[in-house]
Image (cartoon, helix red, strand yellow):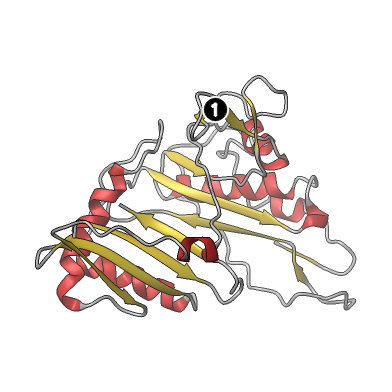
Amino acid sequence: AVADGGGRRIEELRGMVPGGSRAHGGNEDEGGPRWVPDLIAPAVPSHGVPGRDAVVGHLVLHAPLGDNTHRAEISVEVAASWRHSGLDLLMLGLGEAIARSWGRTTAWYWTDCPGWAGVDSPRAVSGLRIPVPGTDEQAAPVRTHETDMVAAAGYRPLHSEWVTTLDVGEALSVDPTPVPGYELVSWSSPRSPENLLDQLARIYALASTDMPSGELSEEPQVWDSQRVLRKEALVERSHQEWVLTAVRPVGGELVGWTTLVLSPTVPEIAYQEGTL
C-alpha cells in the first residue's frame, strides 16, 4: 500500500478487496472465477520529499504447499501514522481474499503483545489463559489495537506463547552438565552437512506436532532433505546467519536440536528458534 505526498485516500485499495473476505464483509460467490490481485510495484520511501510515493503498509501471506494446505498465515503492518485509519483492516481483508482464492479455509494471524494481564482484567485478551511459569497462576495477553482489529474481523484467540529474553553474559557463566552417552554437534550457515540432512528432516517433521499449539489445527509437516535445503536457502536470501546445535547418542543419529538466528538489522540480538 502506497501513499503520495498529499496522503492518498485509502479508498483506492477498497476496489481490490472482494466481498468474500470477513474483514470486508459480504458473501463470496463460490461459483465465480478465482480472484488474483494486481501486483503493486514497490515504491521508494518518500523521506518527506514531496511528490514521491511512500510505503505505508505491507501484507505477507504464508501458504504451505506440501502439507496443511487448508490454512494461510496472514501478517499486516502499517506505518504508525496510518494506524486507526482502517488501512490495516482493508489489508487484512485483501489477505483473506487472496487466501480464499488459493483454496484456503483457515487463516492464522499472530500478534505481538507488550505484556500480560490478569485473566479478569479489561486489559486482557478475552478467551485466552496461559499458565504463568513457576506459579499456579494464569495470565492473558494485554489487548492492543491489533488484537482488537482481528477480533472485530471475526478471529478467535486460540493460542498464546511466552517470549522470554536471556542475557548472554549470564548464560555463559553456566557450565552445561554433560549427559553420559550423548554428544553435541554444531555447525553454522549457509548449509547443513549433507550427511545430516535426512536426520534433520525427521526432527523438523517431529517438531511440527511436538511443540504445543493449543487449539490450532496442524497436520504433521512433510519434510525431506530438499525441504531442509530450501529452508536454509531462504534464510540465506534474507541475509541472516544461523548456528545450529544438535544432540545425539555418541556415534548415533540426531535426537534433538536448537537454532540461533542472527539478523544484520538487529545485530545485538540472537533469536532462538526451533528447539526440540
The location of residue 201, given as percent across then percent down, is: 21, 61
- Compared to residue 53, the image places residue 15 above or below, namely above
Report if residue 251 is visible in the image. yes
Write the residue at 78% across / 72% down.
53
- The N terminus lies in quadrant: bottom right
> SS of the residue at dot 1?
loop
> What residue would you read off at disc 1?
128
In the rendered view, tell whether residue 112 sits above or below residue 44.
above
Amino acid tagged 1: Leu
Residue furthest top as drawn: 120
Residue 268 x %, y %: 60, 71
User: Residue at left 78%, top 49%?
Assistant: 83
* Residue 157 percent across, percent down from the top left: 54, 31
Mark 1 neighbour class, 10 Å CA radius: few under 14, some 14 to 19, many 20 or more: some
Q: Seen in the image, is 53 located left or right of residue 126?
A: right
Tell me which residue sits at (28%, 42%) in the image. Answer: 219
Residue occupying the far left of the picture: 251
Q: Depth check: 245 or 45 in front?
A: 245
